[in-house]
Amino acid sequence: MSEDVFEVPEGNEYRYLVQEEGEEEIQYCRRHYVSPFLVVSRRCMFLIILGVGGLLTLAGYLAYVAQTLPQGLVEVTTECGCLRGRWKDEVYSFKGIPYAAPPTGKRRWQPPADLKEEGLCWSGVRDATRFRSMCAQVRPLIKTGKVMGQEDCLHLSVWTPSLMPPAPLPVMVWIHGGYLHMLSGQEKGYSPTEELAARTQAVYVSLNYRLNAFGFMALKMLRDGSPYNTSGNYGFMDQIAALKWVQRNIHVFGGDPGKVTIFGQSSGGTSVWALMVSPLAKGLFHRAIDMSGSYVFNASLESAEQDNLEFLRRTGCKDTGCLRGLAISEVLKAIPWQEYPSWAADELVDLPVKGHFVGPVAVVDGHVITAPPFKIWESGSGFSDVPFLVGTTEQETDFCPAYQNMSVWTWGDYRWHVTQKLSPFGANVTAQALGLYPSSAPCPTSHRCPERLYNTMVSDMRVTCPNNDLAKRAADALKSPVYRYLVTYTPSKQANISGVPFHPRFSFHLLDSFAFFGGLKDALGVLAPSDIAFQEMVIKYFLHFAREGKMPEEWTKYPLGMALLDRNFSVAQNPSADHCKFWEQNGFYPYAWIN
């Protein structure tokens, strides 16, 4: 028996009994609420005790449960068994819930397997009071990075303010970022909390999905035994499996399976976009929020499989048996992090090197993603037509600036770097860029100091302008409303983010997600009134979108208007029109963020 499955002592009405092999299995599971009649099933049985005069009242039943369960604990039943969670800060939380079979051994580089079909549902009551392992990864993304996590990681967590609300609550499913290489759905300041669920009265789900080579390795060799004659995008399949779990189970936690919002940041935003165009995800969600996601998503399966032969060479493997027998560390060290075509994406925070691109991780595999997303939208069918929100921040690259000494740059340094990077694209391109992003004095008191301006230039070219185009294409394809926002807020002080060696000072990548999840307090310390106002604004509009499937009247649909999120809310028609026209006309969009 797993250490995570509780056995209730003899004499307790709610113990479970497992008979000898071949006989019927009988279990009893306490729950926060059950209907006042007998409910019997193979997986979980709730017994309402008959007393003098008839059935016990619901209040009496709840009082009995409260006495038999340790204080602060609560139990519910899902399709796969009973879960014991926690009641804390006016919210119920259930953490580390498996939503698919562990993708280990023969299941490595296979679509996620159903728990029931694999015979992996549990008897008794499973502990859901703590997070489980993050998925296997290295931090930082280099050969010598620290190996973290496990392959047995396909778990999700749920936070809910009520298990039996008067009306089902909206559900928000969080998909974490990290270049599709690292992080998890349980990062402090970057994932749901009890406080957020309580104050917003919504149900939150956060999930782990396979990352890096474990989640996205495309190799022709891995097509052997594949039910779809494809490889790669296993992490997206995990996300789809988690959304199916939500559809089947979220009602148990007080959530509305007909009002599910998926939202993700960075590669989580890329995941949201992928799910929107995947035929496998249709009907599993009803609104979508893409925060700072990728624009480039067109690598063919064949080209990715060819590029990834470098990974295969490093492993020394000649067959899938060898690949599936490699240790976690051997897989991660075989990834070409810095070597071209690199997976580490180091260059994406600087102006591009002409003709040099980062290797693709997510691919157009023909199964999860049947064609490049823009082609799918242009086809007019095969995608989820749901309300869509696309957001970016004004200085995305400030989170991990290309040069560590940017804070002491002079305007001469700024012009030199721009010229060095853009001169291969032509002298006219360099002159136009310096004209559109002109140096100005004084500095550093001016907000147009060299560091800020260079980060804005790179962010416009890599993220903001391409995502304007993405949102415009979405508006052309979808009947549902499309909205766009740009975070222009500069925090009251430099941010100090755990595990990040830099201290961003402007409108950095992650700022909007930190504001939503309450991570600004950890990053900034004591919040200024302006920080609080920005945080409240992000929460207000995200929750309105999740509840209503649209924004309030003051937020104009795109492309008629773009919301600017500062300490105050405003709408502009196209604040970056000249900049974006320049980058697009000079062919820079293929250098936009990928993965």
Image: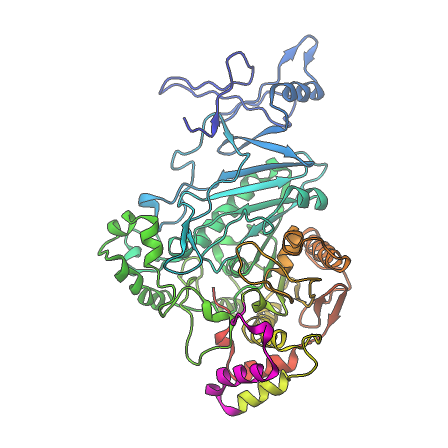
Q: Residue furthest left?
A: 318
The answer to whether any part of residue 229 appears in the image is no
Question: Magenta part of the protein: which range?
Answer: 401-427
Q: Residue 504, position in %: x, y?
A: 60, 64
Q: Nearer the viewer, residue 127 or 365?
A: 127
Identify the residue shown where x is 52% and y is 86%.
419
Residue placed farthest to the top in the image? 52
Residue 144 makes an appearance in the image = yes
Drawn side of residue 194 relative to residue 96, left or right: right
Q: Establish if 419 lies above or below 203.
A: below
Colour convention: rainbow
**Residue at 48% from the left image edge and 77% from the top image edge:** 352
Residue at coordinates 62% horizontally, 41% vertically from top-left? 159
Majority secondary structure in the magenta region: helix
Give the side of residue 566 with respect to residue 267, left or right.
right
Please state the horizontal and vertical placement of residue 177, each as a whole percent of the image: 52, 57
